[in-house]
Structures are given as structure tokens and as C-alpha cells.
Image (cartoon, rainbow, N blue to C red):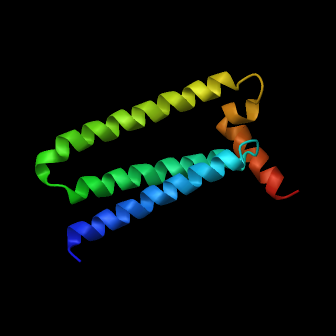
Amino acid sequence: MSIGSRKFVGASVLVLLSIGLAAAFLVLWPEPVSIMLAGMSLLCGFGALLVFCRAVGREYALQARKAIFLGSGCFGIAFVGLAWKYRETAPVFASPHSLLRDCYAWEHS
């Protein structure tokens, strides 16, 4: 197996892990821990993008950087929108500090 194909296998594993964590997020949505699963899903998705970028040649580096920047910007705007939408009905999801405090209280109850 060549180095390039091993990198694609690693990136594919990260993509599958990201999809699994996103599915777990949807299943556990009302729980505060679901937000952490969504964050891990995003990290795995961006990790896969980085592995793909390393596997392709230098001639595609600029396009890969643009894709990562665009993807991270879209996810950031989406999370700001969700925090704004749920600021009244679910303030736990709008504030990272209260999210961590409630997750800690939920685990130790």
C-alpha cells in the first residue's frame, strides 16, 4: 500500500468517525453532552480535510486552504446562529461556561 493511499484510508476513517459522532449528536440532542459530540465531529471533519490536503500535491494547496477556510467560516456562522436562536429557550446551549458547568453537574449527579 502506497503512502498516498494510506493517507486516504486515514482520512476516510476520520470522515466515518465524524459521521458517527454527528449521528450520536442527533440521538442525544437534548443532553448537554451532545454539543461536545458535535464539536468532536467537526474536529474529525477538519482533520480529514487536513489529511486530504497533505495527500495531494503542492499544486492544490491554495484550493485546499480556501476550502478549509470556507468550511470553518460556515461552521462558525452556523454555531453563532444556533446560539442566538436558543439564547431564550435553552440558555445552556448559548453559553459555553454554563454548558460546562451543567455537564459537570449532570455527570456527578
Quarter of the figure with the C terminus: bottom right
Residue farthest to the right, as pictured:
109
- Estimate the x, y position of residue 81 in percent, counting from the top left: 57, 25
Quarter of the image with the N terminus in it = bottom left
Tell me if residue 45 comes above or below residue 92 in the rendering. Answer: below
Residue at x 82%, y 52% (from the top left corner): 106
As displayed, is residue 9 above or below residue 42?
A: below
The one of 101 and 29 positioned closer to us in this rendering:
29
Q: Residue 102: x, y in percent?
A: 78, 45
Q: Position of residue 26 (x, y in %)?
A: 66, 45
Q: Residue at x 74, y 35 (%)?
A: 92
Q: Position of residue 38 (x, y in %)?
A: 58, 46
69 horizontally vs 92: left or right: left
Corner quadrant of residue 35 = top right
Farthest bottom residue?
1
- Is 34 displayed left or right of 73 in the figure? right
